[in-house]
Amino acid sequence: MLADETKQRLLGRFRDETTHQIALLWANLPRLEQAPDNSETLYSMYVSCHNIKGNLGMMLLLDNNMPDLTEVARRLELIMQNLSKGTTRLEPEIYRLLNQNLQQIELGLG
């Protein structure tokens, strides 16, 4: 069992890293819109989504009172995975879903 101080420190680190990854995604969204087939942008965004999903899972383990945002992060990661593989095109609906899921995670983090 972790001490409360250790839990809070870890939660802070996971929250900071998640906030950083979200900022990277917001910065890359216009790049993705301008060049939806850019493999570097797609990969960077996929990695950010993957990191967010893992961070949120760890945060939930440390604090079961926080909202479970891992499913939202999983959907975000799946969208980016499909865009990267070319099985999904960046249609307006997909772009809207990316924005919506990012906003939902931000709101859940507070």
Image (cartoon, rainbow, N blue to C red):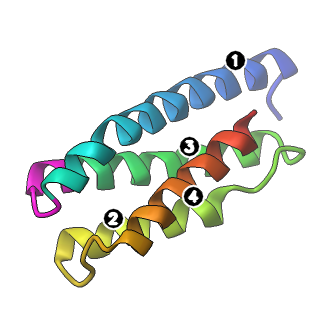
Q: Residue at x 53, y 30 (%)?
A: 19
Q: CA distance from mark 3 to mark 1?
A: 14 Å
Q: Nearer the viewer, mark 2 or mark 1?
A: 2
Tag 4 near tag 2, CB within 8 Å? no
Tag 4 near tag 1, CB within 8 Å? no
Q: Which mark is residue 80?
A: 2
Please name the amino acid that badge 2 sits on. Met
Tell me if 24 is positioned left or right of 96 in this view.
left
Q: Which residue is mark 1?
A: 9
Q: Which residue is mark 3?
A: 55
Please name the amino acid that badge 4 sits on. Gln
Tell me if 1 is positioned left or right of 31 in this view.
right
Q: CA distance from mark 4 to mark 1?
A: 29 Å
Tell me if 10 is positioned left or right of 30 in this view.
right
Nearer-the-camera pick, 66 or 40? 40
Please name the amino acid that badge 1 sits on. Arg
Q: Is residue 38 above or below residue 28?
A: below
Q: Nearer the viewer, mark 2 or mark 3?
A: 2
Residue 11 x %, y %: 69, 28
Q: CA distance from mark 2 to mark 1?
A: 30 Å
Which mark sits nearer the N-terminus, 4 or 3? 3
